[in-house]
Amino acid sequence: MVVSLVYLLIYSLYKHYYLPYRVLQRTGLPFDRPTYLVGNKFDFDPSLLHERQLERQKKYGLVYGEFFFTVPTIFIADPEIIKSIMVTHFSNFCNRFQAINLPSLFEKSILRIADEPWKRIRTTMVGSFSVAKLKCMQNLISDSCRILMARFEESFYESKKIALIKPCEHFSMHILLAVAFGIEFESVKDERKITEAVNILFSNTPVGLRVVMMLSMRAWEALERLMGGNFQSSIDYLEKIVMNVIKDRRNNIKLKKPCRQDILQLLIEAGDKGKLTDEEIVAQVFFLMAGGYQTTATTLMFALYSIATNSNVQEKLYDEIQAKYDNSNCQVDYNFVSELPYLGMVIEETTRMYPPVIFPDRGVKEDIVINGLLIPKEVMIGFPTYAIHHNPDYWPNPEEFRPERFSPEEKAKQIPFSYITFGDGPRQCLGVRLAKLEIRMAIVNILLKYELFPVKETEIPLKLKSLGTMIPANEIVLGLKKR
Ligand code: HEM
C-alpha cells in the first residue's frame, strides 16, 4: 500500500510537475517556479488576472511562460507573433487548448470541437450572423430595448439614478433567449424561472468551484450534487425547453406555418439538411448563451460608464445621433445605428479599455518556430488581451478614453493585431456583429431619452474583476437627466 502510494506520488510529480516544467524550459522563456498541481495560479489573486497581465508584461516583456495549473502556457503580447498564430500559421493553431473541464453538454459546442467538425459547424453557423439575418432579428432586439428603457424609466422616477448591472444583464440575456433559445415568454412566472436557470449556469462561477471543475469534473459533479444540484437541474430544464421549441418549429415547418427567423431556426434548418444533429444544435445554443451573455452585458455597462464619465464624448455622440434622428424620422434599427460612425468608435474604444475576454487561447498541433520563438506542441498559447490593450507602445496614454483612436485616419496607423477584443482570423468571435448591433441599439435608445452623468456612488476609476470574463468589481451607478 505504502509502496503504491509512493509510486503514485512520484509518477504524479513526474507527469504534473517535471514534464510541464521541462516543456517551458525548452523554450528558453522566463517564468516563475510553479507549485505542484496549481502551477502559478495562486501566485496572485485569481480574480485580478488583468492586473497580473500588466505586472508580467512589466517584468518579462511581451512573451513569457506561466503554469495554468499543470498546463505549461506561453503568453504572447507581440502583435507580429499573434498574427502568425491567428492567421499565417492558422492550420497549426486552429484548435483551442482544452485546459478546463466543462459539463458534457458543452463538449459538442463550437468552443470545444476541433479540426473538421469545427469547420463544418462554423461554416453552418456563420450564416446566422449575416447582415440579412441580423435584420430579421432586429425586432427582437427592439423588444429587449423597450424592456431596458422601461427599467431606466422606473429608476428615473424612483431616484434619478440607475444601477447598471441587472438591467444590462437582463437585456443581453433576453435577446439571447429570443434569438438562440427561440423562447417566447408565455408569462412573467415563466420568464422568472427561465432567467433564474440561465443565471445559475452562465453568471461568473466562483473561483473555488472553477478550481474544482478544472481539476476533476467528477469531483465537481459530486460537490454540486451536495450543494443542491442547481447547476445540473438548470441544464436539464433549459435543455428540455430548447428541445420542445425545436419540436414545435419542426411541426410548423411541416405544416408550412411561418417560423421566426432567428439563430435557432437556421440551426434547425441545417439539421434538417443533415448538417447538424439535435445534440449538436443544443450544444451550440448553450454555448451562444455562454459566449454572448456576460460579454455583451458588461460591454454595454462599460460603454455607458465611459460615456457618462466623459461628457465631451457624450455630447459629440448625442449630436451625431440627434442629427440623424431628426433628418430621417425613423426607427432605431440596423440601418439607423450602422450609419453612426462615432458610436462605432466609442464602442471600439470601450472594448479596448475594457476587453471582456482577456485570455483567449489556442492549442498547438506540431512544434514550430516563429520569429525565433520555439512553440512546443504541448503548450497552451494565451493572449493577454488586457495587457496588449494597455501597452503604451501601441496605445499612447492607454488609460485615457479617446474614441478618436478608432477614426479611419488613426485606425490606418494602428499596429495590426494590437486590438483583439474579438480575437482574429478564422477562429474570431462569431457573434461580433450581433453584439455590436445590440450595444449600438441600446446606447442610441438610452441617449435619445437621457443624459448620463457620474454621481457620488460612481466609482472613478472603475475597479475591475477578471474571472471568466472581465467585469466591474462593484455596481456601476449613474445619474439620469431627461432630455
Ligand atoms: C462584446 C461581446 C463579445 C466579446 C468581447 C466576445 C469575444 C470573443 C472572443 C475573444 C472569442 C475568441 C476568439 C478567438 O479565439 O480568436 C470569441 C469566440 C466566440 N464568440 Fe464571442 N464575444 C462577444 C459576444 C458574442 C456573442 C453575442 C456571440 C453569439 C451569440 C458570440 C459567439 C462566439 C462564438 C460562437 C465564438 C467561438 C468561435 C469559434 O471558436 O469558431 N460572442 N468571442
Image (cartoon, grey):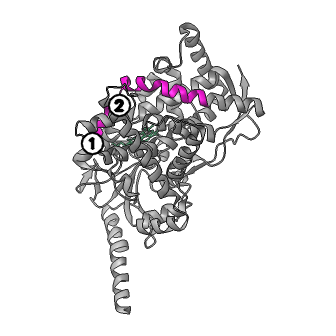
Instruction: Tell me the SS state at disc 1.
Output: loop
User: How many numbered marks, from 0 up?
Assistant: 2
Instruction: Tell me the SS state at disc 2.
Output: helix
> In this figure, which residue is indicated by the disc labeled 1?
276
Q: Which residue is located at x 50 percent, y 30 percent?
A: 438
Extreme residue in the bottom direction = 2
Horizontal and vertical percent position of residue 125: 32, 36
Vertical relation: 224 (above or below) 327: below
Q: Quadrant of the C terminus?
A: top right
Tell me the number on the disc at residue 112. Answer: none
**Helix, strand or loop for the magenta stretch, by majority:** helix
Task: Tell me the kind of residue under disc 1.
Answer: Leu
The quadrant where residue 227 appears: bottom right
The quadrant where residue 33 appears: bottom left
Extreme residue in the front direction = 255
Q: Is residue 129 magenta?
A: yes
